[in-house]
Image (cartoon, grey):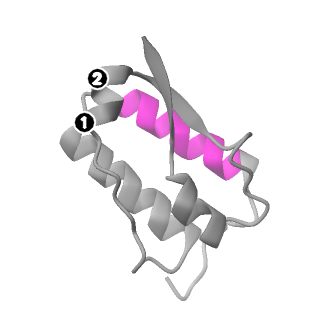
């Protein structure tokens, strides 16, 4: 059985990503057992969409068997879907 996991997590994404919609946000299908083992981590100290995505990817790399190739695809999908939020800024 599979379950969808939003990357970055929906609660923080709503706060930092312009036009984020939980129904269309970037997510991956994970086995239910893997998804249940992912702690509900909040990145409230993060102040940008780029920082949020980076924090979430690092967290997932450390605690899940998600291949790096999949995580790289997730990064590219977020940049494509929300280009305004993932522009590189000089103040980061």
Separation of residues labelled 2 and 1 (CA atoms):
6 Å
Q: Secondary structure at mark 2?
A: helix
User: Circles 2 and 1: CB distance less than 8 Å?
Assistant: yes
Camera sees residue 66: no
Q: Is residue 45 magenta?
A: no
Residue of label 2: 33
Camera sees residue 84: yes
Give the residue furthest to the bottom.
91
Image coordinates of residue 85 in percent, x first then y, are: 69, 66
For the point 20% across and 41% down, the residue is 63
Q: Is residue 73 left or right of residue 45?
A: right
Image coordinates of residue 54 in percent, x first then y, are: 41, 59
Q: Quadrant of the N terminus?
A: top left
Image coordinates of residue 45 in percent, x first then y, are: 39, 80
Q: Is residue 70 magenta?
A: yes
Q: Is residue 30 left or right of residue 86?
A: left
Residue 37: give its label: 1
Choose between 57 and 45: the one closer to the eye. Answer: 45
Q: Is residue 35 left or right of residue 63?
A: right
Q: Name the quadrant containing residue 82.
A: bottom right
Q: Is residue 84 left or right of residue 25?
A: right
How crowded is the residue under tag 2: few (<14 C-alpha within 10 Å), some, or many (20+)? few
For the point 74% across and 47% down, the residue is 81
For the point 31% across and 44% down, the residue is 60
Q: Secondary structure at mark 1?
A: helix
Choose between 62 and 33: the one closer to the eye. Answer: 33
Q: Give the residues in magenta.
A: 66-80
Q: Main secondary structure of the magenta part?
A: helix
For the point 54% across and 60% down, the residue is 11
Residue 74: give its label: none
């Amino acid at each position: 059985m599979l379950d969808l996991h939003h990357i970055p997590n929906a609660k923080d994404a709503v706060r930092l990503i312009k036009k984020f919609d939980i129904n269309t946000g970037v997510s991956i299908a994970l086995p239910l057992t893997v998804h249940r083992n992912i702690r509900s981590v909040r990145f409230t100290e993060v102040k940008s969409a780029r920082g949020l995505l980076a924090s979430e990817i690092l967290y997932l790399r450390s605690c899940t068997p998600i291949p790096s190739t999949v995580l790289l695809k997730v990064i590219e999908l977020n940049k494509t879907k929300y280009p305004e939020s993932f522009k590189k800024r000089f103040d980061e």
